[in-house]
Image: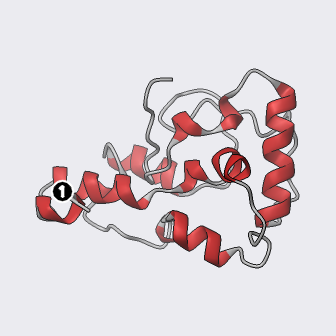
Amino acid sequence: MTEMIGYCGYNCHRCAARSDDPALRQQLVDGWRKFFGYENYTAENVRCDGCPSDGRLADQSCQARPCARARGVPSCAHCDEFPCDKMRHLMGSRAGMLIGCYPRTAAITEDEYNLCMRQFDSLPNLLRLLAEADKLPAWAIEV
């Protein structure tokens, strides 16, 4: 699948919400309930084309996407007000999510992580985007 990075740095291309398979989307929803406590998603309403698209969106309450579009920036990292309260809570890392959702993640499998959390690992993308926008030195992304 072609890389698709959301305005906030999410890995839209890794998200099962973009799948045509309702059973896979249901597994995603079940995982989000288990690890994040999200109760409002179903296999039908989680269907998403990715926030850079003009199609369906899973998170109808997201404030980062409409703001980035209104400002005409390719990502939140390019905005002069980055990081703002509209997207600060969207900045995630693998370690942060596993620890932040602990103890629900104590027995998480790699497959569950890849299905339910990997798409939210936005910090590497944000670092890269900040460096590309000359807001961080290049060495900051060479980890």
> Which SS class for mark 1?
helix
Location of the C terminus (image quadrant): bottom left
Give the quadrant of residue 15.
Answer: top right
Q: Is residue 113 or residue 12 the one in the foreground?
A: 113
Instruction: Report the residue marked by disc 1.
Output: 131
Q: Is residue 50 left or right of residue 40?
A: left
Colouring chosen for the image of the structure: secondary structure
Q: Is residue 34 left or right of residue 60?
A: right
Crowd band around label 1 with a 10 angstrom C-alpha radius: few (<14), some (14–19), many (20+): some
**Which residue is drawn at the image coordinates 67% and 55% (left, top)?**
61
Q: Position of residue 64 (x, y in %)?
A: 49, 56
Q: Position of residue 55 (x, y in %)?
A: 61, 27
Q: Is residue 105 or residue 54 the one in the foreground?
A: 105
Against 108, is 128 above or below? above
Image mark count: 1
Whether residue 44 is visible here, answered yes or no, is: yes
**Which residue is drawn at the image coordinates 87% and 30% (left, top)?**
23
Q: Position of residue 140 (x, y in %)?
A: 20, 65
**Which residue is drawn at the image coordinates 50% and 49% (left, top)?**
10
**Which residue is drawn at the image coordinates 70% and 26% (left, top)?**
19
Q: Is residue 27 left or right of residue 74?
A: right
Against 97, is 24 above or below? above
Q: Type of residue at label 1?
A: Ala
Give the quadrant of residue 35.
Answer: bottom right
Against 69, is 19 above or below? above
Q: Is residue 7 or residue 139 the one in the foreground?
A: 139
Q: Position of residue 122 (x, y in %)?
A: 46, 56
Whether residue 76 is visible here, answered yes or no, is: no
Give the quadrant of residue 115.
Answer: top right
Q: Is residue 34 left or right of residue 59?
A: right
